[in-house]
Image (spheres, helix red, strand yellow):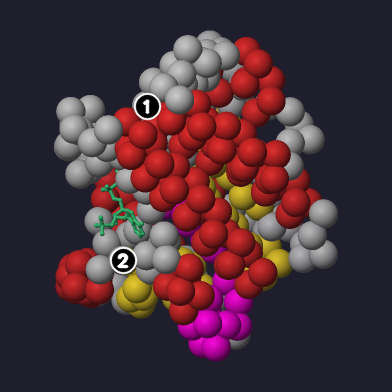
Amino acid sequence: MGRLAVVTGSNKGIGFAIVEALCKKFDGTVMLCSRDLERGQKAVDVLKQKGLNPVLHQLEISDQNSINKLAETIKNEYQGLDILVNNAAIAYKHDATEPFVKQAEDTINVNFFANLDVCKTLFPLLRPHARVVNLSSSLGMLKQVSSPEIRTKLSNPNLTEDQLISIVKEYLADVKAGVHLDKGWPQTAYSTSKVFVSALTFIQQREFNKDTREDIVINAVHPGYVDTDMTSHKGPLTIEEGASAPVYCALLPPNSTKPKGDMVWCNSKIVDWQSLESVE
Ligand SMILES: NC(=O)c1ccc[n+]([C@@H]2O[C@H](COP(=O)([O-])OP(=O)(O)OC[C@H]3O[C@@H](n4cnc5c(N)ncnc54)[C@H](OP(=O)(O)O)[C@@H]3O)[C@@H](O)[C@H]2O)c1
């Protein structure tokens, strides 16, 4: 039975470099997912020229039908999933002219809810010893939230997915009411979305710990400040450097106990998500 790794949003940027590294290091098929098949095929062609052999699959994470089709392919052709890297995300630029309510809704819908839909659909296919990586950010650290009350809610060690979804909805309501900054939410919708992704990751590990399938590990990763379209190429790290910590977490050996349900920095070290100090 062949092993399978899936990387979402991997036609470019850090996701592309994660696919390239997994093609070299992972003993199995690596699926390069792209919402646009033409862009995906171009990315696959670049890797094929390097002698690598990723498999292309269409995936728009905001479209449940598209996620379902990927799940069908995984079930029918691979019978299970060994690595899932939730990499796809969006970020509005600082000079974006869209109203903040739209920016917040779009960003939370893609970065939080669509990634959650991918998890809900694909987690049942994970095999024992599977590794899941959620791409978070330094902007997804708890200290980005200035409100101590919201920080307390988000860092509750018994927080459930449903409770987290209620908090996410509370954020969107505060944005609509124009009071999100007064309430102590982060400055940007992107930062808030990544705080939620981090909080979700810790909940998901607690759920995996109760799962009958043994040794499923999930971590949230800050890949570093990377030279990609998302950062308008301002980040100093190459995409290969940005892929390093996600790939480390994707390839954690069987029965590893650390990192597990942790926040992992770009140097592959665990950081305290709740710390209010600088971790760099
Ligand atoms: N770059 C950094 O410095 C940095 C720092 C911290 C965290 N991160 C995180 O690292 C991850 C990768 O970032 P990046 O800098 O490589 O970004 P990027 O260059 O903008 O690439 C993002 C990828 O996600 C895809 N995507 C966006 N929305 C999607 C959707 N709805 N469905 C499917 N695919 C979608 C994009 O596809 P299209 O090409 O079709 O748009 C693209 O392949 C993100 O989660 C980001 O938040 C990046």
**Disc 1 designates what residue?**
188
Name the residue at 37% across, 26% down.
Answer: 188
What residue appears at the point 51 percent right and 50 percent down from the top-left corner?
Answer: 113
Out of 216 and 66, give the one closest to the viewer.
Answer: 66
The location of residue 172, given as percent across then percent down, is: 49, 34
Asked whether residue 122 is drawn in magenta, I would say no
Amino acid type indicated by mark 2 = Arg
- The boundaries of the magenta stretch are 70-87
Extreme-bottom residue of the structure: 76
| Cα distance in 3D space between marks 2 and 1 | 25 Å
Rendered view: 10 above or below 50: above
Q: Quadrant of residue 223?
A: top left
- How many residues crowd mark 2 within 10 Å: few (<14), some (14–19), many (20+)? many
Q: How many marks?
A: 2
Query: Disc 1 residue type?
Result: Thr
On screen, 210 above or below 165?
A: below
Q: Secondary structure at mark 2?
A: loop
For the residues carrying marks 2 and 1, which lies nearer the camera in this image? 1
Residue 28 location, x and y as percent? 48, 74
Does residue 87 appear in this view? yes
Q: Which mark is residue 279?
A: none
User: In the image, what residue occupies the spot 32% across and 37% down?
Assistant: 103
Q: Does 159 sit left or right of 62 as displayed?
A: right
Which residue appears at 20% of the width and 67% of the height? 39
Q: Nearer the viewer, residue 192 or 28?
A: 192
- The spot of residue 102 in percent (x, y) is 33, 39
Residue 241 visible? The answer is: no
Q: Is residue 2 above or below residue 122?
A: below
Quarter of the image containing the N terminus?
bottom right
72 part of magenta stretch: yes
Dot 2 beta carbon under 8 Å from ligand 1: yes
Name the secondary structure under disc 1.
Answer: loop
